[in-house]
Image (cartoon, rainbow, N blue to C red):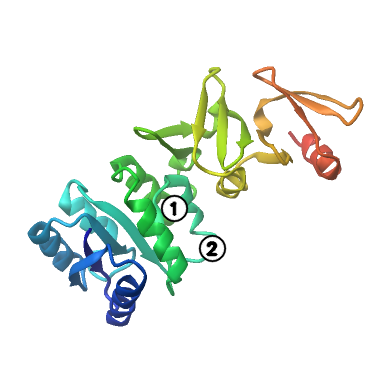
Amino acid sequence: MKTIIIDDEPHCVGYLQVLLQQYCPQAQVVATACNGQEGINVIQHYGPELVFLDVEMPVMNGFRMLEELGEVPFQLIFTTAYDRYALRAFKFSALDYLLKPIDPQELKNAVGRSAKSQRPHPQQLAMLESHLHHPEAALSNKIAIPSLDGFQFLHLDDIVTCEAESNYTTFHLRDGKHLLVSRTLGDVEETLKGRGFFRIHKQFLINLKHIEKYVKGDGGYILMSNLQQVSIARSRREEFVMLFSKV
């Protein structure tokens, strides 16, 4: 894979080059750049298959550089020093990232995923920038879900429940459709944290807006707006009752 690294910190570029040589020999670094304009020049000259892009750079940051390019005909992995809360923005947009200082195993995983994933969609990039710089924006009510032929962009209100299926998760939607994605329920839960979802059971994450009825009974269960009956784990019952009273 022809690879380019774009980062304004030379030591970060050098460190990433060393890691790629040692752990990801399939990623051949053909050029590096220390700012957005140089990044555009080397991308247009080499036509890379994979680009590592620093989010924050002076004069022209990573997003402005991508806008100048117009289209992104390569796999893209962002490198960032953002804290763990801001990193949720990457999960909402389903774009890959590496947190500085870069961990070798995380690098291997990211490069491996890049060989199998779709090229970034413009709406994903718009979602990411909005979440990073304007977390209160209305666009934060959407999430990007990887699918076999690209990405599906869902409004959070359209998700009724998320059901664990081994290393996959099935999204049960308001219109009755189902969407199977290659992400664990734990990953989905982390992405949707603080957005009105609750892990009611090891197998289910529910949208509190879609609760129709709480039936105490033996163990108790929740009736959702799509008529799904979801059991409540004993360990989550007390916390749920407290939340339910606020819905």
Res 11 quadrant in image: bottom left
Query: What residue sits 26% from the left and 63% below the top?
Result: 27
Query: Residue flagged by tag 1: what amino acid is it?
Result: Phe
- Compared with 92, 100 (above or below) is below
Horizontal placement of 211 versus 187: left or right? right
Percent coordinates x, y for residue 98 in the rendering: 41, 64
**What residue is at 89 percent from the left and 27 percent from the top?**
216
* Quadrant assignment for the C terminus: top right
Residue wearing tag 2? 84
Q: Amino acid at mark 2?
A: Arg
Residue under the point 77% across and 40% down = 243
| Rendering coords of residue 62 (x, y %) | 28, 60
In the rendered view of the protein, which quadrant contains the N terminus?
A: bottom left
Label 1 Cα crowd, 10 Å radius (few <14 / some 14-19 / many 20+):
many
**Where is residue 100 drawn, in percent x and y?**
43, 72
Residue at 59 percent of width and 50 percent of height? 190
Helix, strand or loop status at disc 2: loop
On the image, which quarter does residue 244 sit in?
A: top right
Residue closest to the far left? 45
Image height of 10 relative to 220, above or below: below
Residues marked 1 and 2 touching at CB (< 8 Å)? no
Task: Please state if 3 lies on the left or on the right of 162 as rendered.
Answer: left
23 or 90: nearer the eye?
23
Which is more N-terminal, label 2 or label 1?
Answer: 2
- Residue of label 1: 90
